Image (tube, rainbow, N blue to C red):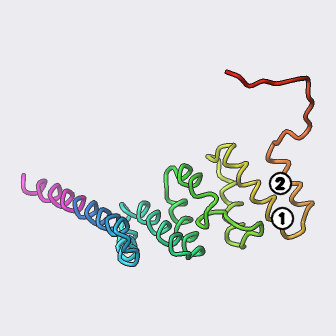
Amino acid sequence: MKRIFLFPLLFFCVSMQVQAASLNEAWALFKDNKLSDAKYAFERCSQDAAMKEEAFLGLTLICQMTNKDDEAFKYFKEFFLISKNPYPYAYAMYHTASFAYSDGKLKKERLAFIEEVLKREDVDGTFKTNLYQSLVNHYLAINKSDKAKEFRKNIGAIDKWQMLGEFENIS
């Protein structure tokens, strides 16, 4: 009877060790600037549900470093959709090729992704403001100023200011 319980426990411990070793190997390759080997290692890790989230993040970084913007976006989107809390990473990657970086006009898949993220219930106000600003910039870039004004209203910016007098910010 003890053997029946011992075998699954042993299997679990060994599989956890292999998972940790695989991700550690991928990050070690990344640190050594062996990006093609690291990419292959992260791709292997992305096949395992337990390592998938971190693997997609590693793949995002590699593709971003090698100027494969569309591929970086694809991996980041995969990461974002499976992560329990993607927002710290989304904040960090927001103005990069992995997320919403553009010269104004967004590609269709990025535009759709931003609109999809805005529909989520767990998006905080600051991040929503960034997303709306990207939409405003997009619609201004394609000369649809009416649509840009519509999204700008969602930002909540204060644009009617009045001055009362001097203000000194001395602490």
Marks 1/2 in contact by CB < 8 Å: the verdict is yes
The amino acid type of the residue labelled 1 equals Tyr
Mark count: 2
Which residues are the magenta region? 2-16
Note whether residue 31 is visible: yes
Note whether residue 1 is visible: no
- Residue at mark 1: 139
The amino acid type of the residue labelled 2 equals Phe
| Residue at the spot 27% in from the left edge and 60% down from the top edge | 20
Viewer-side residue, 83 vs 144? 144
| Residue at the spot 90% in from the left edge and 23% down from the top edge | 165
Vertical comparison of 160 with 11: above or below: above
| Residue at the spot 38% in from the left edge and 71% down from the top edge | 33
Q: Secondary structure at mark 2?
A: helix
Viewer-side residue, 39 vs 164? 164
Q: Percent position (x, y) of residue 83?
A: 49, 56
- Residue at mark 2: 151
